[in-house]
Amino acid sequence: MSSSSLPKTKKPEDLRSARWFAPDDLRSFGHRSRMMQLGYSEEEFRDKPVIGVLDTWSELNTCHAHFKERVQDVKRGIFQAGGFAVQMPSLSLDESSLKPTSMLYRNMLAMETEEMIRAHPLDGVVLMGGCDKTTPGLVMGAISAGVPMIYLPAGPMLRGNYAGKILGSGSDGWKYWDERRAGNITDEEWLGVQGGIARSAGTCMTMGTASTMTAIADAMGLTLPGASSIPAVDSNHQRMGSDCGRRIVDMVWEDLTPDKIVTDAACRNAAIVAMATGCSTNAVVHLIAMARRAGVDLTLDDLDALGRVTPLIANVRPSGKDYLMEDFFYAGGLRALMKQMEDRLDLSVMTVTGRTMGENLEGAKVYNDDVIRPLSNPVYHEGSLAVVRGNLCPNGGVIKPAACDPKYHVHEGPAMVFDSYPEMKKAIDDENLDVTPDHVLVLRNAGPLGGPGFPEWGMLPIPKALIKKGHRDMLRISDARMSGTSYGACVLHVSPESFIGGPLALLKNGDIIRLDLPNRSLDMLVSEEELARRKAEWKAPEPRFQRGYGWMFSKHVTQADQGCDFDFLETGFGQKAGEPDIY
């Protein structure tokens, strides 16, 4: 790792932790005494940067199964650089086990992170995350807290394998489930896929939400260069962990805080890189929320404009055709991809290395130009995502054009509407369902308030009646999200959501829906007079929560197009809290 170009301006007496440990008073006596109770002598923590290692390990979070060991690598680096490391267990948001959705708790992790940093004697932090919502949750909180921070991505798991076939997280789960529903594979084969699709610690090895968000953090300048691409169980990941520990200590002495890194230009870089990777649709919600914590007013229209002019050059599933994240790493990783498109990036932005993005990309090379394509031979001529608007989604909806059958880019068909997931599931499993490939499946009441929590239900299963006839895609619309490992002609994040009376709530079975992706429009062909009549008859459903965290979530979460942060956590809501009183 190249050395920083920044001067070390902070002195021991300027350390934030000095407020706890330096004064000759009764309260600081207590702080020092309790540290000694832990077995540390004063010289181990006095006049040294105290670094919090925010660790999202749990025994249910498979993506972070290696963090129990990796935290030791980070601490080793901190101690080597003359810092004092303290492990701070944090809320572990695992995508597979946490219900109804980990998205319900992203903002809780952000709140915990911000308050944990502010309330403790921490001079800087290493954020250890990776599973989908941990990256935005940790980063949002750390941006608001404002101390030097560096992000350590969990890294993708190894490629899946069964019967000589390479398996991709999520993507092949959906694929083989449809084949099982169609009667094309046996129970034994299905169980073989189940046992072979996830073979090591680490995040999904497709370009799902986890790899998308760690790439965004990388492109934003919040990780060591290329850290997001390193597989979780590769020894390079261990070395990267100790590098993070050493670097955060210097960042404290340099006073390199998030506000000097997460700028308008850095957010734009992150969005461009995300589009080029074939990113998850969830990138929209999280990137907007992260940017707004830094005071950057990033919008859906900004992202759509970048998507129109940014070719998709990472040939990684599900938007790509052939490769997975392990292949991406061997091909040069994110640094190589960014090098391919450096003329489109602002290379002057500062990063956690203390050097500019341009300096970090020096020497990066592509080792397989089918995995990381040149701009002249993209996987898809535009970026990963597109934003549509119309009378069905006046505030926007999101679709992944490269991951769906092109024949649905312009499509008109009758709506088949479901008010709940159980209602939809019962219908699509009915082999006698009266449905054609031209129908448009619609699921509503699955947004931030309706889900509740904005669950990943948006990749609606293809009806069994069509599966058995060989159909594998059709137009689907919802106010839900979908997994970043998903694919298909799915319009998601319809805003405003149906649960609060958005136009999706007014749609009826048989109404004709028209999608025109080239012109970015999505409409129901229903007159304004008829929609006004339906709106007058619409009745608001009962709130999902009556107390507790869910009640607070319901009162303060913003809509999908606004990033789904809590309104009171956004930068513009009020003055930032100061340092805690110590008496």
Image: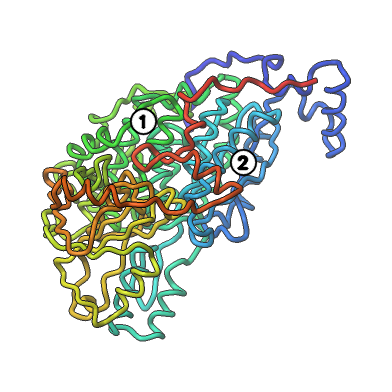
Q: Secondary structure at mark 1?
A: helix
- Residue 330 visible, this orientation: no
Taking the image as shown, residue 33 lies to the left or right of residue 364, namely right
The C terminus: image quadrant: top right
Q: Is residue 303 above or below residue 501?
A: above
Which residue is more in the foreground, 163 or 446? 446
Name the residue rendered at 32%, 44% in the picture.
Answer: 496
Q: Secondary structure at mark 2?
A: strand
**So how many labels did they put on this image?**
2
- Quarter of the view holding residue 76: top right
Taking the image as shown, residue 31 lies to the left or right of residue 194, namely right
Give the amino acid at mark 2: Leu
The residue identified by callout 2 is 54
Q: How is the image coloured?
A: rainbow
- Residue 163 visible, this orientation: yes
The residue identified by callout 1 is 267
The x, y position of residue 100, in whole percent, is: 49, 59
Which residue is more in the foreground, 55 or 444? 444
